[in-house]
Amino acid sequence: MNTTGALIYLVSTLTDLYVTAILLRLLLQWVRADFYNPLSQFLVKVTNPILVPARRLIPSIGKLDTASVVVMLLLELLQLVVIGLLSQTDFGFQFLLVFAVRKLLIALLLTYFVLIIARVIVSWIASQSRHPLIPLIYQLTEPVLRPINKLLPTMGGVDLSPLFALIALRALLLLLGW
């Protein structure tokens, strides 16, 4: 049995889930989503233990919650250090830093990829639903889709902006080697 592989999997999965929670919270703050939405409340409760102390040390820069970005970067670096120790591989600090930033960019792009697909599915089957997640999906994807809608208006009642956004996101993911 490969216990090292299982430990690496657990460390990666748990870190990636927590980084995604922080990323979603940051994006929800950025779009000024409803703070009292149940998903927003869940993300606040899950991420507060690490973000509240970090915000005391790291001030925001303008509208950017710098503490969230620094915490995500530190978690990615810690994850890579632990994986390096478990696999007995020595990575240089520059490599770790570049790889951690790359992982964060990929996480951001994948998050938007999934959110846009979710928005398309919701628009097909549950646009009249009152589920609390639906307004958040629309709020999160609007900043990405709005510029495309300005360039490419709806044609015959069909909004093609999600398609072009997904193509652009996939191209960016390919450029990052994912």
Image (cartoon, rainbow, N blue to C red):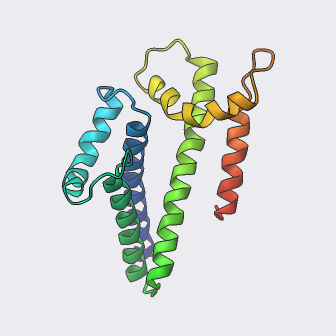
Residue 77 in the image: state x and y as whole percent: 39, 70
In front of the other: 4 or 43: 43
Q: Residue furthest right?
A: 156
Residue 52 in the image: state x and y as whole percent: 20, 50
Residue 129 in the image: state x and y as whole percent: 49, 14
Residue at (31% x, 55% y) in the render: 67
Residue at (63% x, 33% y) in the render: 145
Q: Is residue 16 above or below residue 9?
A: above
Residue 79 in the image: state x and y as whole percent: 39, 69
Q: Is residue 89 above or below residue 166?
A: below
Q: Is residue 1 visible?
A: no
- Quadrant (top left, top right, bottom left, bottom right) of the C terminus: bottom right
Q: Quadrant of residue 172?
A: bottom right
Residue at (25% x, 52% y) in the render: 51
Q: Is residue 109 above or below residue 129?
A: below
Q: Residue furthest top?
A: 128
Judge left or right: residue 115 versus residue 67: right
In front of the other: 121 or 103: 103
In front of the other: 89 or 27: 27
Residue at (23% x, 53% y) in the render: 55
- Quadrant (top left, top right, bottom left, bottom right) of the N terminus: bottom left
Q: Is residue 170 visible?
A: yes
Judge left or right: residue 92 versus residue 43: right
